[in-house]
Image (cartoon, rainbow, N blue to C red):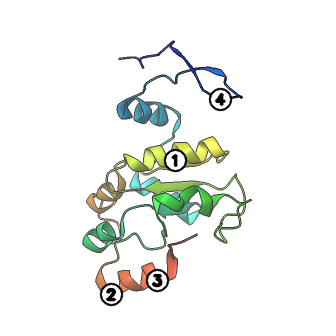
Amino acid sequence: MGASSSTTLSRSRGPNAVLREEAPVKTVAQLLAAARERLHRVTPRQAVAAAEGGALLVDIRLSEERLAQGAIPGALIISRNHLEWRLDPTCDARIPQATGYDRQIIVFCVEGYTSSLAAAALQDMGFSNATDLDGGFRAWARDGLPIQRSASLREHEAETAIHTM
């Protein structure tokens, strides 16, 4: 199941016209597989140990998902839309914890699909220690690890959420 490649050349119009090869087509399944080939995904228990050692746990789930499922205590809440800007140590929109490219970052979503693609994007930026939580928040909950709910969750979101640029 390889990516289909197009050899068709397209010509842009206008005074600066150039010939360019169309990008190969890749399915989301192929993108996910390629991302996971280079990630050293961690289990929930490995994530706990990594966080105790200074790794950042980053929750990219939607607010509605956190309200319904709960939150991982100590995890930073950064929407997927803002992830790269918040973690880039050279960006004016960075968070205080974004101090360099060598810090371990463990991204998680509900089940571990979106987080795999997000972690791969962070690796593309130079975060060689970026990875994701295998199985996402559901695996964390299934392992019986701590979860914040309701009122404490609202306080957690107010303290750690990064909403706008």
Measured as percent of width and height from the top left, residue 42 is found at 45, 48
From the image, state whether disc 3 or disc 2 is nearer to you: 3
- The correct choice, above or below, for 135 with respect to 35 in the image is below
The residue pinned by badge 2 equals 151
Q: Which residue is mark 1?
A: 119
- Quarter of the image for residue 156 reads bottom left
Can you identify the residue that label 4 sits on? 14
Of mark 3 and mark 4, the one earlier in the sequence is 4
What percent of the width, then of the height, locates residue 62?
A: 36, 65
- Choose between 26 and 141: the one closer to the eye: 26
Amino acid of disc 3: Ala
- The crowd level at tag 1 (other Cα within 10 Å; few <14, some 14-19, many 20+) is many
Identify the residue shown where x is 30% and y is 70%.
Answer: 64
The one of 25 and 32 positioned closer to us in this rendering: 25
Query: In whole angstroms, how far apart are the C-alphas of marks 3 and 2?
Result: 11 Å
Q: Earlier in the sequence, mark 3 or mark 1?
A: 1
Residue toward you, 3 or 21: 21
Q: What kind of element bears circle 2?
A: helix
Question: Circle 4 sits in a helix, a strand or a loop, which is it?
Answer: loop
Give SS at disc 3. helix
Measure the alpha-carbon separation of dots 2 and 4.
59 Å
- In primary-sequence order, the first of circles 3 and 2 is 2
Kind of residue indicated by mark 1: Ala
The residue wearing badge 3 is 158
**Local crowd size for mark 3, using a 10 Å CA cut-off: few (<14), some (14–19), many (≥20):** few
| Mark carried by residue 76 | none
Question: Dividing the image into 4 quarters, which one contains the N terminus?
Answer: top left
Residue 1 located left or right of residue 41:
left
How far is the residue under mark 3 from the one under mark 4?
51 Å
